[in-house]
Amino acid sequence: MKIKTLFGEEEIQNRVAELAEEMNKFYNGREVYVIVVLKGAVVFAADLIRHFNMPVKTEFIRLSSYGANTASSGKVHAVDIALPDLNGKNVLIIEDIIDTGLTAKFLLDFIGCNFKTKSTKFCSFLDKKTARVNDIEPDYFCFEVDDKFVIGYGLDYNGNYRNLPYVGYIQNV
Ligand code: 5GP
């Protein structure tokens, strides 16, 4: 399979550092509860939070909307969403990509219904704006992508390619 690179390793690392700097300014030393959406956001989150200069607590949750192929099922399932008490906390959700926006909406609604946070921000590594079915916009994102199925830097195709240090797409998919 031939993978066409969209964002190279150096470009990603530079952009992640730049975005983290923006967040460091916003949080200004205040503690943040980072919620990493498994599995896709792990690589991005690991790089991003290592640039943070505020106190950070890290939680992981697991949802699913994709089946074994490249099409969204259109339904979001909570697979594991055990979270600590987030009342009065600064919450930062970290996702790999916003596609239809259904996962982001599910999560934001879940946090909004269960906690009165001090702030809730949504950060996605990639933003596929043209695929959106709702009005969700990330507070932070690294890159915008076209409506293509992308892989690498945490994003998989049937469980593979998460380890690639760059982002690309499979040309024959
Ligand atoms: P949404 O609920 O916004 O449609 O989709 C969110 C989830 O679908 C993402 O967290 C990701 O796991 C998966 N997804 C959406 N687009 C892509 C893509 O282009 N590549 C990969 N590997 N996963 C995607």
Image (cartoon, helix red, strand yellow):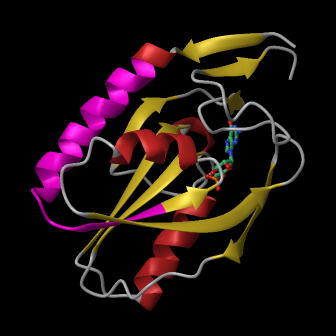
Residue range of the region highlighted in magenta in the rendering = 11-35
Res 112 → quadrant: bottom left
In reply to whether residue 29 is colored magenta, the answer given is yes
Q: Residue 14, relative to residue 78: is it above or below?
A: above
Q: Residue 83 in the image: x percent, y percent? A: 50, 81
Q: Residue 137 in the image: x percent, y percent? A: 41, 51
Number of numbered discs: 0
Image quadrant holding the C terminus, namely top right
- 7 lies left or right of 33: right
Q: Which residue is painted at 26% across and 78% down in the image?
A: 89
Q: Which residue is painted at 45% across and 87% down in the image?
A: 113
- 51 lies left or right of 84: left
- 20 lies left or right of 162: left
Q: Residue 172, relative to residue 156: is it above or below?
A: above
Image quadrant holding the N terminus, namely top right
In reply to whether residue 54 is colored magenta, the answer given is no
Q: Residue 166 in the image: x percent, y percent? A: 58, 21
